[in-house]
């Protein structure tokens, strides 16, 4: 088993019904893109987007959590990006959190557990 | 020498590549001489290279027992090679023992930046696995931070675990209000016998804190005298035993004015919470230094002490209530006796605490004791507390004390609590009915309100008896309100006489409400007959209240009755001088869906009659609404299509404006102004857009006369977009033009253009943005449509689909938002209001939007709630500003 695949299983994932996140490659001035979160864990996010992203690309991510007044700000790294089918321009992208503002990863996990479990 | 032998053997086997045999050797050795093997391996791990070290650790993880955790932690801490350190951390997560979590946490500060992500992920996984430990650690981290403690406490309650009990038993003894409050809250649900023992200890601590706190509070508020005397009192109250030598040192410090250390030591004796300590310290320091304190310090210290004592009292009661609940759960039948023995007879709060204990210990015995309290004590505070406690219990018969206080005309609090208990128990209708005959007005009022609150049907007859003209106003009012919970013909008949004067307006309004809401099936019909026959003589002042009740009620259900009385409403509209009454009549008629020809004809003719009564030059809002309503109703009866005629007229007027320049343009504009009426554009959105663009262009015309005439037309149209242009022109004009502009800006926006935002068109090149925004907005109740291709988006708008708002992205591949908006406006197809969403922070780009005229800018990323709120604000703001 590769280290990468181990990492992807490191955090419990919570299915997210109507969650949305904003993403933009770190250091770019372009538009923030809006993506649909498929599931979320304290390790990262899996979301759907209509643009592909390179593996290893660092992204500024902003996402909402219930009962939270502010958007949660994080920097995440693209770990995998897969097109569901070629006709439909939907990309499933797994990103791993590198840092999360105002939260330590463990506290974020506790929060997610409280909200989604 | 097992140690050296083992090390040597392992190194020898490693040298010849016999790793399988190393694994077997370690397994055997751990089985035979475990401690010595671990010590030997610990030493060996530090001596071998990183690769072999990792291999050895992998072999040890086959065993995976908890006593290997320190060995792993030590190895991770000392591993110099980042790659091996990461691998060791990943390997560490295979431990299935909760001891692994604190061990991993202990090396948090030793982890370098490169290893940190790996460390955090492994830590995260372990926290998730051993969530109990995490919540407990979070609870502890919340010292002085109640929100954090509460969050952790909530988590514990979500998924209870036995480990929480000993942990919380300990935490409630910490001198922190948050720990105690949250700890007691959880323990009340989860605690066991051990918790009760700790709570007895807490009770002692709290009582000491309370006594010392009360003494300190008294000292702070009283005359403090000189520093020596103050210190002496303070020291005495703190209850600390100092040696002669220490006291002498204190005295010397005091004489030298060095009070800081001294104060810390003495204050320690009061066991104050940390924030209380901090807040009252400046005042005590001043007093020990002989200085006059600031008014702020004085008042802050007093306020802090008040809150502190209240908090202690709350904790004391929470503590004993929780003890009661737990003891009942663990079936400790002796608990109440034990508490009685524990609480000293001279404790000032003894009875109060015992009552709180009984409130938690919900047994028959506790109920009996509480009843005994209610029946025997005279202290109003104890009685009130006992009655509150009794609300947690069922009752088969009414305690004497409760019965007695039901008609207590001296103490309203006890009376209401007693009556409330009867209501909660569903007992004593006869007592409540009897209280309605009490000579005291207050008793009668409370009885009526209690009977209504708890639906005591048996008291209805008695209530009706109080509906008499000679009854005092407050009782009559309470009776009129009370019978409202028993709807029926009788109730309507009983209260209707009180709608007319000479009763007070409050009683009349209440009687009207009761007759409307609880007057039976014919209640509204009878009321409208009353109002009709009265003709405004006596009931005119209640017409607005009646209309309000109708509008708040089931309009669909009432429609037939309301239409039966339509002449009354039309007549009232003409006769009434109250704008509010007329407004509500219009509102009511506007909300109806009428299909019967007879009603339609009568209403149209009535409305036309009303419109003839309007005087004045401009059409006011009432006139406009009457006209619109009449038009709507008329259109329902006739099939002729006036809309086509109006469209043709407007188009020809606009053609003339567009075609001409110079003086002929002035004439065309004048003609447009003379002929323009709001109904020309009410069903012609493209015409409106075209007119706005043409008049907007004319406002920017090089010829002064054209501009002046365009200002006059704009002031007739009274559209928000034209107002915006007029406002922007005021800086560039002076003299007659400025006067014309100011006059035009003083005219109010036409109500036709004041409409809430209901439909939104989302234009964004990202499918996901449009999809998500549409989802969110649709959930918020808006009608939403979207497009991802800018050209197709323009085509959609050009088709004349009337959206109230355009939500527009700035950065798009085919054309940017500015260009899109310009094109849409050129084609006169852009929705009236526009919000731009953009990630740009470039001031020039943002200015470009502001120059082109938009209603809002949302900077990405934003919260979806904020977007919805912005649209709602925009919708409301337009309504409010005009």
Image (cartoon, coloured by chain):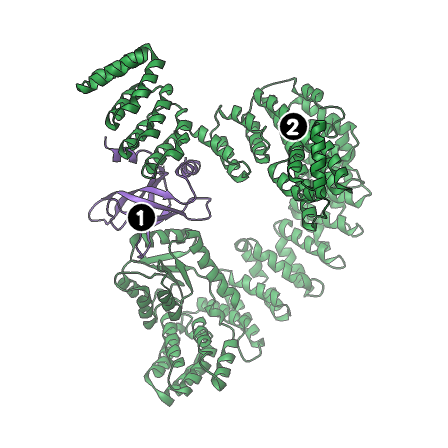
Chain colours: A purple, B green
Judged left or right of residue B629, residue A6 is left
Judged left or right of residue B579, residue A101 is left
Regarding residue B598, the answer to whether it shows in the image is: no
Residue drawn at x 32%, y 44% as measured from the top left? A76
Q: Quadrant of residue B52?
A: top left
Instruction: Measuring from the top left, give residue B725's x and y in whole percent.
Output: 43, 75
Residue drawn at x 31%, y 30% as measured from the top left? B79
Residue for badge 2 = B205
- Camera-nearest residue between B717 and A107: A107
Quadrant of the snapshot with the N terminus of chain B: top left
State which chain disc 1 sits on: A
- Camera-nearest residue between B593 and B835: B835
Q: Quadrant of residue B531?
A: bottom right
- Camera-nearest residue between B174 and B634: B174
Q: Which residue of the protein is positioned furthest toward the left in this rendering?
A: B16
| SS under mark 2 | helix
- Camera-nearest residue between A60 and B301: B301
Q: CA distance from mark 1 to mark 2?
A: 54 Å
Residue for badge 1 = A59
* In this view, the mark in front (1 or 2): 2
Residue drawn at x 54%, y 26% as measured from the top left? B190
């Amino acid at each position: 088993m590769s280290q990468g695949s181990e990492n992807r299983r490191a955090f419990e994932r919570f299915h997210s019904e109507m969650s949305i996140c904003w993403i933009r490659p770190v250091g770019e001035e372009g538009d923030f893109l809006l993506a649909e979160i498929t599931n979320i864990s304290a390790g990262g996010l899996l979301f759907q987007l209509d643009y592909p992203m390179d593996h290893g690309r660092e992204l500024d991510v902003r996402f909402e959590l219930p009962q939270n007044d502010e958007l949660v700000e994080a920097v995440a790294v693209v770990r995998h990006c897969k097109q569901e089918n070629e006709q439909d321009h939907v990309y499933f992208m797994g990103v791993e959190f590198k840092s999360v503002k105002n939260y330590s990863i463990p506290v974020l996990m506790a929060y997610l557990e409280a909200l989604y479990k | 020498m097992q140690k050296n032998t083992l090390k040597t053997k392992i190194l020898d086997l490693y040298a010849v590549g016999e790793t399988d045999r190393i694994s077997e050797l370690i397994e055997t050795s751990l089985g035979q001489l475990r401690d010595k093997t671990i010590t030997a391996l610990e030493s060996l791990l530090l001596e071998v290279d990183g690769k072999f070290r990792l291999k050895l650790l992998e072999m040890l993880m086959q065993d995976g027992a908890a006593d290997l955790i320190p060995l792993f932690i030590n190895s991770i801490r000392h591993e110099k090679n980042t790659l091996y350190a990461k691998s060791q951390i990943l390997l560490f997560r295979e431990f299935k023992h909760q001891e692994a979590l604190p061990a991993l946490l202990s090396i948090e500060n030793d982890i370098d930046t490169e290893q940190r992500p790996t460390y955090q992920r492994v830590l995260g996984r372990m926290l998730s696995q051993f969530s109990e430990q995490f919540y407990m650690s979070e609870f502890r981290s919340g010292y002085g931070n109640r929100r954090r403690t509460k969050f952790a406490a909530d988590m514990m309650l979500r998924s209870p675990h036995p480990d929480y009990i000993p942990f919380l038993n300990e935490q409630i003894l910490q001198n922190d209000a948050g720990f105690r409050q949250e700890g007691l809250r959880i323990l009340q649900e989860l605690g066991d016998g051990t918790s009760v023992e700790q709570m007895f200890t807490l009770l002692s601590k709290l009582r000491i804190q309370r006594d010392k706190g009360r003494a300190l509070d008294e000292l702070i508020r009283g005359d403090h005298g000189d520093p020596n005397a103050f210190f002496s009192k303070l020291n005495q109250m703190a209850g600390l035993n100092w040696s002669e030598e220490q006291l002498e040192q204190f005295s010397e410090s005091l004489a030298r004015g060095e009070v800081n250390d001294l104060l810390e030591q003495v204050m320690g004796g009061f066991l104050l919470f940390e924030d209380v300590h901090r807040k009252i310290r400046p005042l005590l320091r001043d007093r020990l230094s002989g200085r006059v304190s600031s008014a702020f310090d004085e008042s802050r210290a007093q306020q802090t002490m008040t809150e502190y004592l209240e908090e202690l009292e709350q904790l004391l009661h929470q503590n004993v209530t929780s003890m009661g609940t737990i003891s009942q759960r663990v079936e400790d039948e002796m608990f109440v006796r034990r508490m009685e023995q524990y609480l000293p007879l001279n404790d000032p709060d003894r009875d109060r605490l015992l009552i709180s204990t009984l409130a938690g210990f919900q047994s028959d015995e506790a109920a009996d004791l509480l009843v005994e309290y209610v029946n025997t004590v005279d202290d109003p505070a104890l009685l009130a507390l006992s009655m509150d406690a009794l609300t947690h219990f069922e009752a088969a018969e009414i305690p004497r004390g409760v019965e007695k206080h039901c008609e207590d005309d001296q103490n309203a609090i006890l009376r209401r609590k007693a009556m409330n208990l009867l209501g909660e128990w569903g007992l004593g209708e006869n007592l409540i009915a009897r209280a309605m005959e009490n000579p005291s007005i207050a008793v009668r009022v409370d009885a009526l309100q209690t009977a209504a609150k708890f639906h005591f049907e048996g008291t209805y007859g008695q209530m009706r008896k109080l509906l008499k003209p000679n009854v005092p106003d407050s009782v009559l009012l309470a009776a009129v309100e009370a019978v409202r919970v028993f709807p029926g013909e009788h109730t309507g008949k009983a209260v209707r006489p009180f709608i007319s004067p000479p009763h007070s307006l409050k009683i009349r309004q209440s009687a009207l409400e009761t007759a409307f809401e609880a007057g039976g099936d014919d209640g509204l019909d009878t009321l409208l007959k009353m109002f009709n026959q009265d003709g405004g003589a006596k009931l005119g002042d209640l017409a607005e209240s009646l209309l309000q009740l109708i509008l708040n009620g089931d309009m669909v259900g009432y429609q037939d009755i309301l239409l039966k009385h339509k002449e009354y409403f039309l007549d009232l509209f003409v006769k009434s001088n109250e704008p509010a009454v007329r407004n509500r009549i219009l509102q009511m008629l506007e909300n109806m869906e009428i299909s019967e020809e007879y009603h339609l004809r009568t209403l149209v003719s009535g409305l036309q009659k009303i419109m003839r009564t309007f005087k004045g030059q401009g059409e006011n809002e009432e006139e406009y609404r009457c006209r619109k309503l009449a038009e709507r109703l008329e259109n329902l009866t006739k099939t002729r299509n006036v809309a086509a005629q109006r469209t043709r007229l407007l188009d020809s007027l606009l053609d003339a404006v567009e075609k001409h320049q110079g003086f002929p343009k002035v004439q065309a504009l004048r003609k447009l102004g003379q002929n323009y009426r709001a109904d020309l554009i009410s069903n012609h959105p493209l015409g409106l857009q075209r007119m706005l663009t043409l008049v907007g262009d004319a406002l920017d015309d090089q010829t002064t006369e054209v501009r002046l005439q365009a200002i006059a037309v704009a002031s007739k149209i009274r559209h928000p977009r034209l107002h915006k242009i007029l406002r922007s022109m005021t800086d560039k004009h002076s003299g007659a033009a400025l006067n014309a502009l100011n006059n035009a800006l003083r005219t109010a926006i036409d109500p036709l253009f004041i409409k809430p935002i209901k439909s939104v068109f989302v234009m964004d090149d990202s499918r996901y943005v449009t999809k998500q925004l549409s989802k969110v907005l649709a959930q918020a109740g808006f009608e939403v449509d979207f497009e991802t291709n800018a050209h197709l988006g323009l085509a959609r708008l050009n088709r004349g689909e009337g959206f109230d708002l355009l939500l527009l992205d700035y950065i798009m591949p085919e054309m940017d938002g500015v260009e899109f908006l310009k094109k849409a406006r050129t084609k006169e197809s852009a929705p009236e209001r526009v919000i731009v969403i953009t990630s740009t922070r470039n001031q020039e780009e943002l200015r470009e939007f502001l120059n082109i005229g938009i209603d809002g800018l949302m900077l990405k990323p934003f919260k979806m709630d904020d977007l919805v709120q912005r649209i709602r604000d925009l919708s409301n703001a337009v309504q409010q500003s005009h």
